Image (spheres, coloured by chain):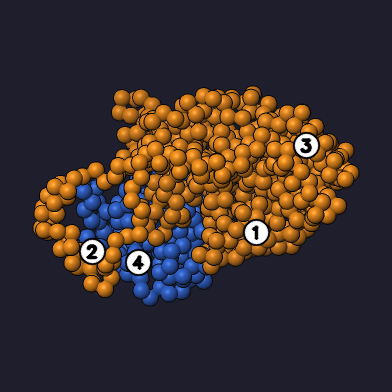
Chain colours: A orange, B blue
Amino acid sequence: MSTYVPNTKAEQQRMLESCGFQSFDEMYACIPEELRLKKPLQLPEGKTEMEVTQAAKAAARKNRVYATVFRGAGAYRHYIPSIVKEVTGKEEFRTAYTPYQAEISQGVLQSIFEFQTDICELTGMAAANASVYDGATAAAEACEMCREKTRKKVLVSATVDPKILSVVRTYSFGRDAEVTVVPEKDGVTDPDALKQLTDGETACLLLQQPNRYGCIEDADAAADIMHEAKAKLIMSCNPIALAVMKTPGETGADIAVGEGQPLGLPLSFGGPYLGFMAADEKMMRKLPGRIVGETTDINGNRCYVLTLQAREQHIRREKAGSNICSNEALCALTAAVYLAAMGPENLIRAALACHANAAALKAKLTESGLKPVHDRPFFHEFVMQAADEAQAERILSALDRADILGGLPLGDGKTLWCATEMNTPEEIERAAAVVKEVLQA
Amino acid sequence: MRRRKKGRVTMNFPKELKYSRTHEWVRLQEDGTAYIGITDYAQDQLGDLVFVNLPSAGDSLQAGEPFADVESVKAVSDVNAPVSGKVKEVNEALSDAPEKMNEAPYDAWFVLAEDVTDTDGLMTAEEYEAFITEEG
């Protein structure tokens, strides 16, 4: 393929000369001799477009795309209406980099404003930002929002996805601050342990709803415990579940975050995904990154601006609360288009279908001989117990041969299963039959 | 009361107050408590103030260390404690009406501090006015 440096040798020479140099060697003369590379970089020669396409296709063939998927654990396969890719594929959106003269790009600002509005409606919170890299980043940034001089202790429930906990720990490591894991009991956060661990130095609790086992947490009780200690509650929520569940706003959470991938983004081997963040009015100014606001121009027409910028790092420098200065604009646009295409009614229908299918799958797997681990309300994920780890592995291999991706192994013969609106009754029957066969062998 | 030109309006530095080099005022009371706010000069430099982030009652104040921040349309700025002590009372009404800091900076107190110490470095109104003339 042709080079992406579009100037000719003659143009390069002219640029050099206008800087007062005759050659590149002369320009780099200020770099000490011993630091200079004396041999060419070990890069292969350029390839033709055809060769590049073939190589990319060969790599893509290594991906295993299952006909049937019963695994979630943070990334969920949902139906994406065709219009979503049609709109987000427009080159004005797809090829544009972050607008540095933001207000000139009214279309991009409008799309971000709509995304923020959608997130506020889903979470029931007062203000949302323009998004961050992914759900784990959103959770970690939310914890930093809550830390104060005399309140540095962050509590994270053991029922939060371990991948999220690990990002929260990474953030805290850099700030030399404490992260305490609140133990779980019967598949949910242990309320007694939570009470015991909460004190005057507690900044916040990070709670996942539904949690990593699919169970519904008693978020109201957690909110009470936190607020009594003048600490904050952060809820990390599944956005599809939010369509039918009590919102963080109704629960009295101070911050709501989550992974936005289920909102129209394909699984794509793990990214790019989308972190959403929303806060109540009191915490609004601590939201990291960009926030788009609606206003009127000098002619009284509706228009959009970047707002509350004074708290951002380009103005507040080292005192800014966060170094997030960008967002996932194309993914946020995708979520906004997805939500517009679905509308509230279809989003609720999709959420209810997720739950109904998961309930059917749980019943069928139980019939096949697996045991449910938790007897609790759930949304679209749940944990089942096999006789032992070896049996759980045999089940997953048998499903794999049938082109079915089974649940996520959690160890000790436990598997985290998931169903969405994409799973048909036939798929559920077929998976249950495969499981039964393994258990009876 | 001394007055200093501020464009066409005049700036005001009440004599009964003490001032810090980072533009906070202190109203020292006989019982060892003190009201703290930002000066007329500070609000003029910052421009229209839209938000104030106040500490909580019981928080300790360390002279020269930030204890609050204010947000104008231009920037977020720290407000330093002009004295050491402990926050006895917070002016919550200021949160709802941050424009009071512009309109009446010496009525717009942030906190009432108790157990006040470290007052030695504070300036009188005359000294402060000379200081900002030099600085400006």
Q: Disc 4 sits on a residue from what chain?
A: B
- Residue type at numbered disc 2: Glu
Of A98 and A204, the residue lying toward us: A98
Mark 1 = which residue?
Answer: A155
- Tell me, yes or no, whether the two marked residues, 2 and 4, touch with CB atoms within 8 Å: no
How much space separates mark 4 and mark 1, taking CA atoms?
39 Å
Relative to A73, does residue A364 appear above or below in the rendering? above
Front label number (2 vs 3): 3
Q: Residue at x 41, y 73 (%)?
A: B119
Gap between marks 2 and 3 measured at Cα: 77 Å
- Helix, strand or loop status at disc 1: strand
Mark 4 or 3: in front is 3
- Disc 4 marks which amino acid? Ser
Amino acid type at image mark 3: Ala
**Disc 4 from disc 3: Cα separation:** 74 Å
Kindly identify which numbered label has been placed on residue A431: 3
Q: Nearer the viewer, mark 2 or mark 4?
A: 2
* Residue under pointer 2: B135
Task: Inspect this view and state whether residue B91 appears.
Answer: yes
Q: CA separation, marks 1 and 3?
A: 38 Å
Q: Is residue A378 left or right of residue A387?
A: left
Q: Are marks 2 and 3 in contact (CB under 8 Å)?
A: no
Element type at mark 4: loop
